[in-house]
Image: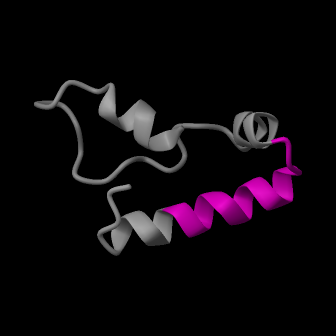
Amino acid sequence: MILTAHAEIPADQRPDHPDMYAVSLDEIATQLNISKSAAGDRRQAADELIRSGYRG
């Protein structure tokens, strides 16, 4: 979801790394059908993966 939003930004305006806070915890929780706390954990884990070079 976050990578999709990042990919939709025009290439010449896209930052090197996605903004992990561009998608709210409420939206992540709703999309994944999990609690906001779990959504925060997932967002943090995704941020760490992306920063370490993961590109999906």
How far from the left and from the top, in percent, is residue 9?
29, 27
Above or below — where is 24 with respect to 16? above
Residue 39, horizontal then vertical, whole percent: 75, 54
Residue at screen point 53% across, 62% down: 46
Q: Residue at x 86, y 49 (%)?
A: 34
Q: Is residue 8 above or below residue 49?
A: above
- In reply to whether residue 37 is colored magenta, the answer given is yes
Image-quadrant location for residue 17: bottom left
User: Is residue 24 located in the magenta-colored stretch of the structure?
Assistant: no
Q: Is residue 53 shown left or right of residue 47?
A: left
Residue placed furthest toward the front: 56
Residue at the outermost left position: 12
Tell whether 24 sits left or right of 48.
Answer: right
Instruction: Please name the predominant secondary structure of the magenta segment in the image.
Output: helix
Quarter assignment of residue 56: bottom left
Q: Residue at x 35, y 65 (%)?
A: 54
Start-end of magenta stretch:
33-46
Residue 2 percent coordinates (x, y)? 49, 41
Residue 51's x, y, as percent?
Answer: 36, 69
